[in-house]
Image: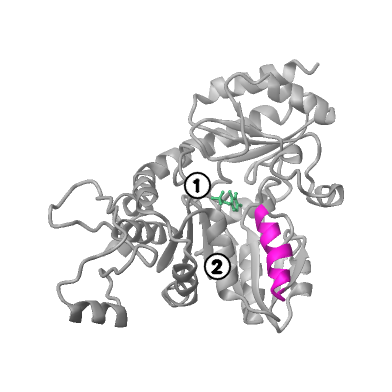
């Protein structure tokens, strides 16, 4: 039944489980453990767990399960394991699925912490990682090998907004028997195309659009039941990265409004890109589905929207960029995105400060690059704020 629902209906209703009180709003089950009617029932639960049976919150919890079912349904996957953060989901999924001697191909335009997991942690455990230009289909073809176990990329990269041709990568990866893991944070759960393109696993930092109001960290690993309730659950439940019930409850409320919020913020991001593209103090604007983006045709073919984030290259390097940021009156300076409040980030000195100059150059993280996350304010106010700050650079 619920499989036929449209996404907005799923985001409000999928996964709902009611207690004996028949509450309207989902209950938050703040409990670590569960009581058994008899010793025999406890023994049976430890032998095999039914769908609505729980034994310990590190393994599963009714509120968390509602959230897992709801977001899996929204993204078009069979199942989900909810985690403490987006990075717990990324590191958990990769560690659960890989072993020493495996080969991984990954796009190099990655969130700093993802790069650390791939380059430092996995390498330490004997996994060979080949980093490539994820926008170059020929580079994927050349890097994939018969022993490639897994490929990893951000559907849309943070902060440079590069777009991966997901159908191509999935087809080529599956041809060598590799699993495809997409970090789907920037694509947003509303416009996600990972399932439609055949990605085996989509990882969502639910800290971003699912919370949407800058409160709680969370992550979700979505995929087929045999992967999620197989190696992923086994790894996550024994290593302790399960989402807490209060976060899951807040996320359930977040999903009820996510469609409205993300559509409004995505429209705002497009309008900001449009309004800033021709400003004399702006060298370049990037938003995946905007004509100013070199890959906009691919982005448009894959998704109805490019998400809630755009980037701009301010002329005059770091000095001008800082003056621009300091002149903003509505847009806040922070390093998060997907908040109801619009946020400007200077990646080169904050989120990507750790990278060497060479790495920054290769990734295009220049001193003038600003990542802008469009919030829920009136778009005309945002445009006016950004333009007044740019105008001061003259
Ligand atoms: C934010 C982010 C993460 C990490 O998520 P947290 O919830 O902060 O741990 C991973 N990947 C991408 C692309 C992100 O934007």
Tag 1 or tag 2, which sits nearer the N-term? Answer: 2
Question: Residue at 77% of width from left, 64% of height from top?
Answer: 132
Q: Nearer the viewer, residue 253 or 282?
A: 253
The magenta-colored residue range is 113-127
Q: Is mark 1 within 8 Å of ligand 1?
A: yes
Q: Position of residue 141 (x, y in %)?
A: 75, 73
Image vertical order of residue 159 relative to residue 174, above or below: above
Q: Please rate how many residues cluster around mark 2, counting C-alpha atoms within 10 Å: few if below 14, some from 14 to 19, many from 20.
A: many
Q: Which residue is mark 1?
A: 207
Disc on res. 144: none
Q: Position of residue 112 (x, y in %)?
A: 69, 52
Quarter of the rendering containing residue 54: bottom left
Q: Nearer the viewer, residue 77 or 341?
A: 341
In this picture, residue 34 sits left or right of residue 76: left
Image vertical order of residue 175 relative to residue 282, above or below: below
Question: Residue at 47% of width from left, 75% of height from top?
Answer: 227
Q: CA distance from mark 2 to mark 1?
A: 17 Å
């Amino acid at each position: 039944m619920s499989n036929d629902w449209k996404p907005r209906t799923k985001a409000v209703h999928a996964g709902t489980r009611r207690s004996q009180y028949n509450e309207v709003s989902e209950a938050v089950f703040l409990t670590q453990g569960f009581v058994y009617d008899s010793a025999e029932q406890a023994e049976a639960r430890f032998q095999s767990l039914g769908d609505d049976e729980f034994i310990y919150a590190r393994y599963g919890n009714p509120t968390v399960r509602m959230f897992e079912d709801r977001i899996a349904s929204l993204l078009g996957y069979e199942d989900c394991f909810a985690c403490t953060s987006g990075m717990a989901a990324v590191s958990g999924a990769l560690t659960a699925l890989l072993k020493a001697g495996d080969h991984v191909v990954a796009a190099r335009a990655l969130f700093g912490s993802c790069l650390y997991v791939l380059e430092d942690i996995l390498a330490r455990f004997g996994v060979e990682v080949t980093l490539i230009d994820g926008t170059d289909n020929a580079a994927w073809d050349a890097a994939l090998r018969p022993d490639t176990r897994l490929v990893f990329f951000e559907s849309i990269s943070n902060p440079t907004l590069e777009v991966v041709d997901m159908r191509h990568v999935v087809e080529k990866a599956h041809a060598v028997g590799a699993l495809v893991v997409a970090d789907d944070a920037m694509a947003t759960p509303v416009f996600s195309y990972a399932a439609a393109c055949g990605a085996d696993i989509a990882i969502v930092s639910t800290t971003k659009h699912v919370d949407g109001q800058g409160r709680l960290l969370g992550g979700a690993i979505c995929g087929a039941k045999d992967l999620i309730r197989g190696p992923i659950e086994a790894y996550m439940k024994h290593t302790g990265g399960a989402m807490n019930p209060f976060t899951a409850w807040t996320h359930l409320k977040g999903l009820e409004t996510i469609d409205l919020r993300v559509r409004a913020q995505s429209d705002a991001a497009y309008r900001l890109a449009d309004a800033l593209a021709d400003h004399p103090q702006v060298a370049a604007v990037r938003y995946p589905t905007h004509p100013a983006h070199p890959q906009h045709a691919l982005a448009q073919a894959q998704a109805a929207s490019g998400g809630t984030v755009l980037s701009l290259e301010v002329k005059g390097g770091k000095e001008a960029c800082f003056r621009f940021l300091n002149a903003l009156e509505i847009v806040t300076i922070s390093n998060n995105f997907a908040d109801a409040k619009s946020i400007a980030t200077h990646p080169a000195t904050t989120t990507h400060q750790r990278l060497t100059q060479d790495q920054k150059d290769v990734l295009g993280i220049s001193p003038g690059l600003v990542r802008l996350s469009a919030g829920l304010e009136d778009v005309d106010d945002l445009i006016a704020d950004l333009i007044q700050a740019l105008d001061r650079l003259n």
